[in-house]
Image (cartoon, rainbow, N blue to C red):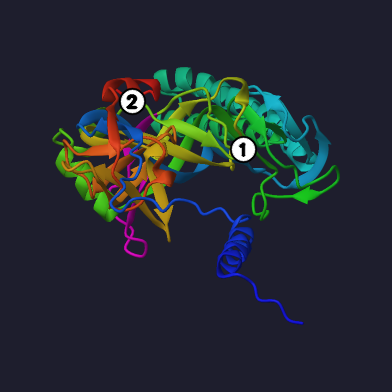
Protein backbone atom coordinates (compact mmCIF):
# COMPACT_ATOMS: atom_id res chain seq x y z
CA UNK A 1 0.00 0.00 0.00
CA UNK A 2 1.53 3.22 -1.09
CA UNK A 3 1.63 6.37 1.09
CA UNK A 4 1.75 9.87 -0.20
CA UNK A 5 4.19 12.44 1.27
CA UNK A 6 2.52 15.70 2.17
CA UNK A 7 3.60 18.69 0.15
CA UNK A 8 4.85 20.56 3.24
CA UNK A 9 7.09 17.67 4.28
CA UNK A 10 8.57 17.39 0.78
CA UNK A 11 9.54 21.07 0.84
CA UNK A 12 11.20 20.64 4.22
CA UNK A 13 13.27 17.65 3.00
CA UNK A 14 14.52 19.53 -0.07
CA UNK A 15 15.55 22.45 2.11
CA UNK A 16 17.62 20.17 4.38
CA UNK A 17 19.47 18.65 1.38
CA UNK A 18 20.29 22.14 0.07
CA UNK A 19 21.66 23.33 3.37
CA UNK A 20 23.80 20.19 3.75
CA UNK A 21 25.34 20.60 0.31
CA UNK A 22 26.26 24.26 0.96
CA UNK A 23 27.30 24.12 4.59
CA UNK A 24 31.09 23.14 4.02
CA UNK A 25 31.91 25.88 1.51
CA UNK A 26 33.26 29.35 2.37
CA UNK A 27 33.45 32.04 -0.26
CA UNK A 28 36.04 34.94 0.02
CA UNK A 29 34.53 38.32 -0.52
CA UNK A 30 35.34 39.79 -3.88
CA UNK A 31 37.33 43.00 -3.54
CA UNK A 32 35.48 46.07 -4.47
CA UNK A 33 36.10 47.38 -7.93
CA UNK A 34 38.63 50.31 -8.09
CA UNK A 35 40.49 49.37 -4.85
CA UNK A 36 43.92 51.23 -4.73
CA UNK A 37 47.36 49.57 -4.44
CA UNK A 38 49.26 50.20 -1.19
CA UNK A 39 51.79 53.04 -1.75
CA UNK A 40 55.19 52.53 -0.10
CA UNK A 41 57.66 55.22 0.75
CA UNK A 42 61.14 55.24 -0.87
CA UNK A 43 64.18 57.41 -0.14
CA UNK A 44 64.77 59.94 -2.91
CA UNK A 45 67.72 62.27 -3.64
CA UNK A 46 68.06 65.23 -5.97
CA UNK A 47 70.90 65.10 -8.51
CA UNK A 48 73.12 68.18 -8.28
CA UNK A 49 76.48 68.92 -9.95
CA UNK A 50 79.44 68.49 -7.62
CA UNK A 51 83.24 68.38 -7.76
CA UNK A 52 84.84 64.96 -7.76
CA UNK A 53 88.22 63.39 -8.48
CA UNK A 54 88.51 60.57 -10.98
CA UNK A 55 91.52 58.77 -12.42
CA UNK A 56 92.81 57.15 -15.57
CA UNK A 57 95.00 54.04 -15.44
CA UNK A 58 97.90 53.42 -17.82
CA UNK A 59 99.84 50.13 -17.99
CA UNK A 60 103.55 50.81 -17.55
CA UNK A 61 106.94 49.17 -17.47
CA UNK A 62 109.48 49.95 -14.76
CA UNK A 63 113.11 50.81 -15.36
CA UNK A 64 115.79 51.85 -12.94
CA UNK A 65 117.18 55.34 -12.93
CA UNK A 66 120.28 53.81 -14.49
CA UNK A 67 120.58 50.39 -16.12
CA UNK A 68 124.24 49.97 -16.94
CA UNK A 69 125.60 46.97 -18.80
CA UNK A 70 128.92 45.86 -17.39
CA UNK A 71 131.16 44.74 -20.26
CA UNK A 72 134.85 43.79 -20.26
CA UNK A 73 137.24 46.19 -21.95
CA UNK A 74 140.02 43.62 -22.29
CA UNK A 75 140.22 40.02 -23.42
CA UNK A 76 140.82 37.29 -20.86
CA UNK A 77 139.38 34.64 -18.58
CA UNK A 78 137.16 35.42 -15.60
CA UNK A 79 139.47 34.79 -12.66
CA UNK A 80 137.07 35.62 -9.84
CA UNK A 81 133.51 36.88 -9.22
CA UNK A 82 133.14 39.09 -6.15
CA UNK A 83 129.35 39.64 -6.07
CA UNK A 84 126.21 37.56 -6.43
CA UNK A 85 123.05 38.16 -8.42
CA UNK A 86 120.70 40.62 -6.73
CA UNK A 87 123.43 42.03 -4.49
CA UNK A 88 123.44 45.73 -3.65
CA UNK A 89 126.76 47.30 -4.61
CA UNK A 90 128.46 50.66 -4.20
CA UNK A 91 130.15 52.78 -6.83
CA UNK A 92 133.70 51.54 -7.34
CA UNK A 93 133.08 48.14 -5.71
CA UNK A 94 134.95 45.22 -7.33
CA UNK A 95 132.65 42.95 -9.33
CA UNK A 96 134.91 40.73 -11.44
CA UNK A 97 138.59 40.14 -11.96
CA UNK A 98 139.80 39.05 -15.40
CA UNK A 99 143.00 37.05 -15.80
CA UNK A 100 145.05 38.67 -18.59
CA UNK A 101 148.80 38.11 -18.03
CA UNK A 102 149.66 39.89 -21.26
CA UNK A 103 148.74 43.24 -19.73
CA UNK A 104 151.00 42.67 -16.76
CA UNK A 105 153.80 41.86 -19.23
CA UNK A 106 153.05 45.05 -21.16
CA UNK A 107 153.45 47.07 -17.98
CA UNK A 108 156.81 45.48 -17.22
CA UNK A 109 157.97 46.01 -20.82
CA UNK A 110 156.86 49.64 -20.76
CA UNK A 111 158.70 50.21 -17.47
CA UNK A 112 161.91 48.76 -19.00
CA UNK A 113 161.52 50.92 -22.10
CA UNK A 114 161.26 54.01 -19.91
CA UNK A 115 164.57 53.17 -18.29
CA UNK A 116 166.18 52.78 -21.71
CA UNK A 117 164.68 56.04 -22.94
CA UNK A 118 165.81 57.82 -19.77
CA UNK A 119 169.37 56.56 -20.30
CA UNK A 120 169.30 57.80 -23.89
CA UNK A 121 168.15 61.20 -22.71
CA UNK A 122 170.96 61.38 -20.16
CA UNK A 123 173.50 60.41 -22.84
CA UNK A 124 172.14 63.07 -25.17
CA UNK A 125 172.40 65.70 -22.44
CA UNK A 126 175.99 64.72 -21.82
CA UNK A 127 176.76 65.10 -25.53
CA UNK A 128 175.27 68.58 -25.57
CA UNK A 129 177.23 69.54 -22.49
CA UNK A 130 180.40 68.23 -24.14
CA UNK A 131 179.88 69.99 -27.49
CA UNK A 132 178.74 73.42 -26.23
CA UNK A 133 182.13 74.62 -24.77
CA UNK A 134 183.98 73.40 -27.87
CA UNK A 135 181.67 75.43 -30.07
CA UNK A 136 182.11 78.46 -27.84
CA UNK A 137 185.89 78.18 -28.28
CA UNK A 138 185.47 77.72 -32.05
CA UNK A 139 187.10 74.34 -31.86
CA UNK A 140 184.14 72.73 -33.63
CA UNK A 141 181.37 74.22 -35.71
CA UNK A 142 177.92 75.35 -34.52
CA UNK A 143 176.49 72.56 -36.59
CA UNK A 144 177.81 69.96 -34.11
CA UNK A 145 176.02 71.65 -31.22
CA UNK A 146 172.72 71.88 -33.08
CA UNK A 147 172.98 68.23 -34.04
CA UNK A 148 173.53 67.26 -30.38
CA UNK A 149 170.57 69.36 -29.23
CA UNK A 150 168.29 67.83 -31.89
CA UNK A 151 169.39 64.38 -30.80
CA UNK A 152 168.52 65.22 -27.18
CA UNK A 153 165.05 66.43 -28.22
CA UNK A 154 164.49 63.15 -30.05
CA UNK A 155 165.53 61.20 -26.96
CA UNK A 156 163.17 63.27 -24.80
CA UNK A 157 160.33 62.52 -27.24
CA UNK A 158 161.17 58.84 -27.09
CA UNK A 159 161.04 59.03 -23.29
CA UNK A 160 157.60 60.69 -23.41
CA UNK A 161 156.41 58.00 -25.81
CA UNK A 162 157.65 55.27 -23.46
CA UNK A 163 155.87 56.93 -20.54
CA UNK A 164 152.63 57.04 -22.57
CA UNK A 165 152.98 53.36 -23.34
CA UNK A 166 153.38 52.63 -19.64
CA UNK A 167 150.28 54.66 -18.81
CA UNK A 168 148.30 52.81 -21.48
CA UNK A 169 149.56 49.44 -20.24
CA UNK A 170 148.59 50.31 -16.67
CA UNK A 171 145.13 51.38 -17.88
CA UNK A 172 144.64 48.07 -19.67
CA UNK A 173 145.85 46.23 -16.60
CA UNK A 174 143.34 48.20 -14.54
CA UNK A 175 140.56 46.99 -16.82
CA UNK A 176 141.17 43.47 -15.53
CA UNK A 177 139.50 44.62 -12.30
CA UNK A 178 135.84 45.29 -13.25
CA UNK A 179 134.13 47.65 -10.79
CA UNK A 180 130.62 49.05 -10.47
CA UNK A 181 130.21 52.52 -12.04
CA UNK A 182 127.21 53.41 -9.81
CA UNK A 183 125.39 52.43 -6.65
CA UNK A 184 122.81 49.83 -7.58
CA UNK A 185 121.66 46.23 -7.72
CA UNK A 186 123.42 43.47 -9.65
CA UNK A 187 121.42 41.65 -12.31
CA UNK A 188 122.01 38.18 -13.74
CA UNK A 189 125.56 36.90 -14.16
CA UNK A 190 125.63 34.66 -17.27
CA UNK A 191 129.36 33.88 -17.18
CA UNK A 192 131.13 31.80 -14.57
CA UNK A 193 134.73 31.57 -13.41
CA UNK A 194 136.95 30.43 -16.28
CA UNK A 195 134.75 31.84 -19.04
CA UNK A 196 136.58 33.58 -21.86
CA UNK A 197 135.27 37.10 -22.37
CA UNK A 198 136.16 40.08 -24.49
CA UNK A 199 134.89 43.51 -25.46
CA UNK A 200 132.98 41.85 -28.33
CA UNK A 201 131.15 39.33 -26.12
CA UNK A 202 127.44 39.27 -26.96
CA UNK A 203 126.13 39.34 -23.39
CA UNK A 204 127.38 41.73 -20.71
CA UNK A 205 129.07 40.36 -17.61
CA UNK A 206 126.04 41.67 -15.68
CA UNK A 207 123.83 44.73 -15.38
CA UNK A 208 123.88 47.15 -12.46
CA UNK A 209 120.60 48.98 -11.94
CA UNK A 210 120.46 52.17 -9.94
CA UNK A 211 116.92 51.95 -8.53
CA UNK A 212 117.07 54.67 -5.88
CA UNK A 213 114.53 56.30 -8.20
CA UNK A 214 112.47 54.34 -10.70
CA UNK A 215 110.99 55.36 -14.02
CA UNK A 216 107.51 54.18 -15.03
CA UNK A 217 107.08 54.42 -18.81
CA UNK A 218 103.54 54.47 -20.25
CA UNK A 219 101.83 55.49 -23.49
CA UNK A 220 99.07 58.05 -24.03
CA UNK A 221 97.00 58.02 -27.23
CA UNK A 222 96.79 60.96 -29.61
CA UNK A 223 93.30 62.00 -28.53
CA UNK A 224 94.32 62.19 -24.89
CA UNK A 225 97.43 64.18 -25.83
CA UNK A 226 95.37 66.77 -27.70
CA UNK A 227 92.86 67.05 -24.88
CA UNK A 228 95.67 67.49 -22.36
CA UNK A 229 97.38 70.13 -24.49
CA UNK A 230 94.21 72.19 -24.95
CA UNK A 231 92.94 72.01 -21.36
CA UNK A 232 96.23 72.55 -19.50
CA UNK A 233 98.03 75.85 -19.08
CA UNK A 234 101.60 76.24 -20.21
CA UNK A 235 103.55 77.33 -23.27
CA UNK A 236 105.56 74.12 -23.46
CA UNK A 237 104.93 70.45 -22.74
CA UNK A 238 107.29 70.63 -19.78
CA UNK A 239 105.32 73.54 -18.32
CA UNK A 240 102.05 71.66 -18.76
CA UNK A 241 103.43 68.54 -17.11
CA UNK A 242 104.49 70.63 -14.12
CA UNK A 243 100.81 71.48 -13.48
CA UNK A 244 99.79 67.83 -13.12
CA UNK A 245 99.08 66.49 -9.63
CA UNK A 246 101.15 63.65 -8.12
CA UNK A 247 100.43 60.22 -9.61
CA UNK A 248 100.11 56.80 -7.97
CA UNK A 249 101.70 53.49 -8.87
CA UNK A 250 99.59 50.33 -8.63
CA UNK A 251 101.81 47.28 -8.29
CA UNK A 252 101.25 43.94 -10.00
CA UNK A 253 99.66 42.51 -6.81
CA UNK A 254 97.02 45.24 -6.89
CA UNK A 255 98.48 47.17 -3.96
CA UNK A 256 99.23 50.88 -4.06
CA UNK A 257 102.88 51.85 -3.84
CA UNK A 258 103.27 54.16 -0.81
CA UNK A 259 105.46 56.69 -2.64
CA UNK A 260 103.78 59.11 -5.03
CA UNK A 261 105.49 60.22 -8.23
CA UNK A 262 105.46 62.97 -10.82
CA UNK A 263 105.10 62.86 -14.60
CA UNK A 264 108.29 64.56 -15.73
CA UNK A 265 108.84 63.93 -19.43
CA UNK A 266 106.96 63.22 -22.63
CA UNK A 267 108.37 62.06 -25.94
CA UNK A 268 108.62 64.72 -28.62
CA UNK A 269 107.18 62.42 -31.28
CA UNK A 270 104.01 60.38 -31.71
CA UNK A 271 104.61 56.79 -32.72
CA UNK A 272 103.12 56.46 -36.20
CA UNK A 273 102.45 52.74 -35.72
CA UNK A 274 100.57 53.01 -32.43
CA UNK A 275 99.39 56.63 -32.53
CA UNK A 276 100.65 57.19 -29.00
CA UNK A 277 103.24 59.20 -27.12
CA UNK A 278 105.55 57.76 -24.49
CA UNK A 279 105.60 59.47 -21.10
CA UNK A 280 107.66 58.91 -17.96
CA UNK A 281 106.71 59.17 -14.30
CA UNK A 282 109.44 59.18 -11.65
CA UNK A 283 108.97 57.61 -8.21
CA UNK A 284 111.34 57.48 -5.23
CA UNK A 285 112.14 53.88 -4.33
CA UNK A 286 113.47 53.72 -0.76
CA UNK A 287 114.63 50.28 0.20
CA UNK A 288 114.83 49.20 -3.46
CA UNK A 289 111.37 47.59 -3.18
CA UNK A 290 110.61 47.79 -6.91
CA UNK A 291 113.08 46.27 -9.33
CA UNK A 292 113.84 47.24 -12.89
CA UNK A 293 111.86 45.26 -15.47
CA UNK A 294 108.68 44.87 -13.41
CA UNK A 295 105.23 46.00 -14.55
CA UNK A 296 102.73 48.30 -12.87
CA UNK A 297 99.90 50.76 -13.52
CA UNK A 298 100.33 54.52 -13.38
CA UNK A 299 97.15 56.06 -11.97
CA UNK A 300 96.69 59.68 -13.05
CA UNK A 301 94.03 61.66 -11.13
CA UNK A 302 91.96 64.45 -12.63
CA UNK A 303 89.21 66.70 -11.25
CA UNK A 304 85.72 67.09 -12.70
CA UNK A 305 84.07 70.33 -11.53
CA UNK A 306 80.41 69.63 -12.43
CA UNK A 307 79.97 65.89 -12.25
CA UNK A 308 76.57 64.23 -11.83
CA UNK A 309 77.09 61.46 -9.28
CA UNK A 310 74.72 58.56 -8.67
CA UNK A 311 75.17 56.08 -5.80
CA UNK A 312 75.74 52.55 -7.02
CA UNK A 313 72.86 51.21 -4.92
CA UNK A 314 70.45 53.52 -6.81
CA UNK A 315 71.15 51.74 -10.10
CA UNK A 316 70.28 48.41 -11.62
CA UNK A 317 71.53 46.61 -14.70
CA UNK A 318 69.60 44.96 -17.54
CA UNK A 319 71.39 43.31 -20.48
CA UNK A 320 74.58 45.23 -19.88
CA UNK A 321 72.84 48.60 -19.58
CA UNK A 322 72.53 50.60 -16.38
CA UNK A 323 69.28 52.25 -15.23
CA UNK A 324 67.90 54.41 -12.44
CA UNK A 325 64.32 55.24 -11.44
CA UNK A 326 63.46 58.92 -11.88
CA UNK A 327 60.58 60.34 -9.85
CA UNK A 328 58.02 62.21 -11.94
CA UNK A 329 55.90 65.12 -10.70
CA UNK A 330 52.90 62.78 -10.67
CA UNK A 331 54.49 60.62 -7.97
CA UNK A 332 55.25 57.76 -10.36
CA UNK A 333 58.67 56.55 -11.40
CA UNK A 334 60.14 55.92 -14.82
CA UNK A 335 63.29 54.00 -15.69
CA UNK A 336 66.12 56.02 -17.24
CA UNK A 337 69.04 54.49 -19.08
CA UNK A 338 72.32 56.21 -18.07
CA UNK A 339 75.84 56.20 -19.48
CA UNK A 340 78.31 56.36 -16.62
CA UNK A 341 81.77 55.43 -15.40
CA UNK A 342 82.68 54.17 -11.97
CA UNK A 343 84.32 56.34 -9.33
CA UNK A 344 87.69 55.35 -7.79
CA UNK A 345 86.08 54.03 -4.60
CA UNK A 346 83.51 51.95 -6.52
CA UNK A 347 80.55 53.42 -4.59
CA UNK A 348 79.31 55.90 -7.18
CA UNK A 349 78.88 56.35 -10.89
CA UNK A 350 79.70 59.53 -12.80
CA UNK A 351 76.82 60.04 -15.24
CA UNK A 352 77.69 61.34 -18.70
CA UNK A 353 74.27 60.93 -20.30
CA UNK A 354 70.71 60.12 -19.21
CA UNK A 355 70.21 62.49 -16.25
CA UNK A 356 69.99 66.24 -15.75
CA UNK A 357 70.70 68.43 -12.75
CA UNK A 358 67.58 68.62 -10.57
CA UNK A 359 66.31 65.13 -11.43
CA UNK A 360 65.07 63.18 -8.41
CA UNK A 361 65.96 59.49 -8.29
CA UNK A 362 65.09 56.61 -6.00
CA UNK A 363 68.05 55.91 -3.69
CA UNK A 364 67.24 52.42 -2.38
CA UNK A 365 64.88 49.53 -3.02
CA UNK A 366 64.89 49.81 -6.80
CA UNK A 367 64.52 46.04 -7.12
CA UNK A 368 60.93 46.33 -5.88
CA UNK A 369 59.87 48.92 -8.44
CA UNK A 370 58.69 48.76 -12.02
CA UNK A 371 57.87 51.26 -14.71
CA UNK A 372 55.02 53.52 -13.62
CA UNK A 373 55.06 52.51 -9.94
CA UNK A 374 53.58 55.06 -7.57
CA UNK A 375 55.70 55.80 -4.50
CA UNK A 376 55.69 58.03 -1.49
CA UNK A 377 59.00 59.93 -1.74
CA UNK A 378 61.10 60.49 1.38
CA UNK A 379 63.66 63.20 0.70
CA UNK A 380 67.25 62.42 1.74
CA UNK A 381 69.91 65.11 2.05
CA UNK A 382 72.12 64.61 -1.02
CA UNK A 383 75.25 66.01 0.61
CA UNK A 384 75.07 63.50 3.44
CA UNK A 385 74.94 60.61 0.94
CA UNK A 386 78.08 61.66 -0.93
CA UNK A 387 80.03 62.78 2.13
CA UNK A 388 79.71 59.27 3.53
CA UNK A 389 81.20 57.98 0.28
CA UNK A 390 84.16 60.34 0.35
CA UNK A 391 83.02 62.84 -2.32
CA UNK A 392 82.71 66.56 -1.86
Q: Which residue lies furthest to the front in this view?
A: 1
Which quadrant is home to the C terminus? top left
Foreground residue among 278 and 128: 278
Q: Is mark 1 on a helix, strand or loop?
A: loop
The residues colored magenta run: 262-279
Instruction: Look at the image and tell me whether residue 76 can be seen.
Output: yes
- Residue pointed to by mark 1: 253
Measured in 3D between alpha carbons, the distance from the residue under mark 2 to the one under mark 1, in whole angstroms, is 29 Å
Which quadrant is home to the N terminus? bottom right
Horizontal relation, residue 48 to residue 289: left or right: left
For marks 2 and 1, give the one nearer the viewer.
2
Instruction: Look at the image and tell me whether residue 91 can be seen.
Output: no
Q: In which quarter of the image is residue 343?
A: top left
Q: Which residue lies furthest to the right in this view?
A: 194
Image coords of residue 322 (percent x, y): 36, 52
Image coords of residue 195 (percent x, y): 82, 48
Tell whether position 57 is magenta: no
Q: Which mark is residue 334?
A: none
Q: How crowded is mark 1: few (under 14 residues within 10 Å), some or many (20 or more)?
A: few
Instruction: Establish if 161 lies above or below 203.
Output: above
Image coords of residue 17 (percent x, y): 63, 64
Number of on-image labels: 2
- Residue pointed to by mark 2: 386
Amino acid sequence: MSQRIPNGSLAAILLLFFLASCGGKSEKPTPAAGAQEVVKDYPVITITPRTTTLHTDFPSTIEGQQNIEIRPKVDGYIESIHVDEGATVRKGQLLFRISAPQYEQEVRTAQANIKIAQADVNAARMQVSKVRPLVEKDIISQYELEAAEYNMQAKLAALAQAQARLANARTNLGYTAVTSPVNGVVGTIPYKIGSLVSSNTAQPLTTVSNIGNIYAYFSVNEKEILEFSTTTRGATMQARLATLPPVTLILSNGEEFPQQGRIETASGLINTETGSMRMRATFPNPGNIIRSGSSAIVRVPYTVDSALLVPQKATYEVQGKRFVYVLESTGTVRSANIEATGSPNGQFFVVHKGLNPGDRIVLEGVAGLHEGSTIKPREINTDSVFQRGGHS
